[in-house]
Image (cartoon, rainbow, N blue to C red):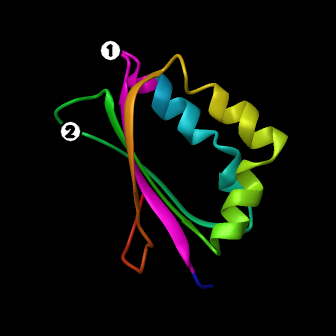
Amino acid sequence: MTITHGFHATMTAQPGQGDALVTLLERAPSLGHDDCLVFLIGRSASNPDLVFVTEGWRSAEAHADFFASDVARAYTAEFGPLVLDSAYADEVPLGGKAIL
């Protein structure tokens, strides 16, 4: 499986909403999508409202097609009340290890 598209997101939750943001991310519809090969959620050890996501997709087209779907649009609309600020950087996961 080859990952050709991905990103790393840093999201600052509204004060006290870090747990709710993580819970929302844990039910991301992309987790069950065959073209989403990496979906990792992380959190700052010193700031529970600072949350990170790394995604890796087979292609930019697969990612775009998925996020144009009604399911994905409805899901992303749920972030509005929880997220104070966010930043995204393109990132293609290349390898490593995750035991969660």
Taking the spot 21% from the left edge, 30% from the top edge, the residue there is 47
Residue 37, located in which quarter of the rendered image? bottom right
Q: How many neighbours does mark 2 have within 10 angstroms: few (below 14), some (14-19), or many (20 or more)?
A: few
Residue 33, located in which quarter of the rendered image? bottom right
Residue 56 vs residue 46, the one in the foreground: 56
Residue 79 vs residue 30, the one in the foreground: 79
Against 79, residue 36 (above or below) is below
- Residue 29's disc is none
In front of the other: label 2 or label 1?
Answer: 1
Taking the spot 81% from the left edge, 47% from the top edge, the residue there is 69
Q: Residue furthest bottom?
A: 1
Against 74, residue 31 (above or below) is below
- SS at mark 2 in the image: loop
- SS at mark 1 in the image: loop
Residue 84 vs residue 13, the one in the foreground: 84
Q: Position of residue 100 (x, y in %)?
A: 42, 56
- Residue 45's disc is 2
Which part of the image, by quadrant, shows the N terminus?
bottom right
Residue 1 counted in the magenta span: no
Q: Which residue matches tag 1?
A: 15
Q: Residue furthest right?
A: 70
> Which tag, 2 or 1, sits closer to the chain's start?
1
Taking the spot 69% from the left edge, 58% from the top edge, the residue there is 64
Q: Position of residue 51 (x, y in %)?
A: 36, 38
Q: How many neighbours does mark 1 have within 10 angstroms: few (below 14), some (14-19), or many (20 or more)?
A: few
Q: Looking at numbered disc 2 in the image, what kind of residue is underneath it? A: Ala
Tell me how far mark 2 sits from mark 1, CA to CA: 15 Å
User: Which stretch did the figure color magenta?
Assistant: 3-19
Q: Residue furthest left?
A: 46
Residue 13 counted in the magenta span: yes
Q: Position of residue 82 (x, y in %)?
A: 48, 20
Q: Looking at numbered disc 1 in the image, what kind of residue is underneath it? A: Pro
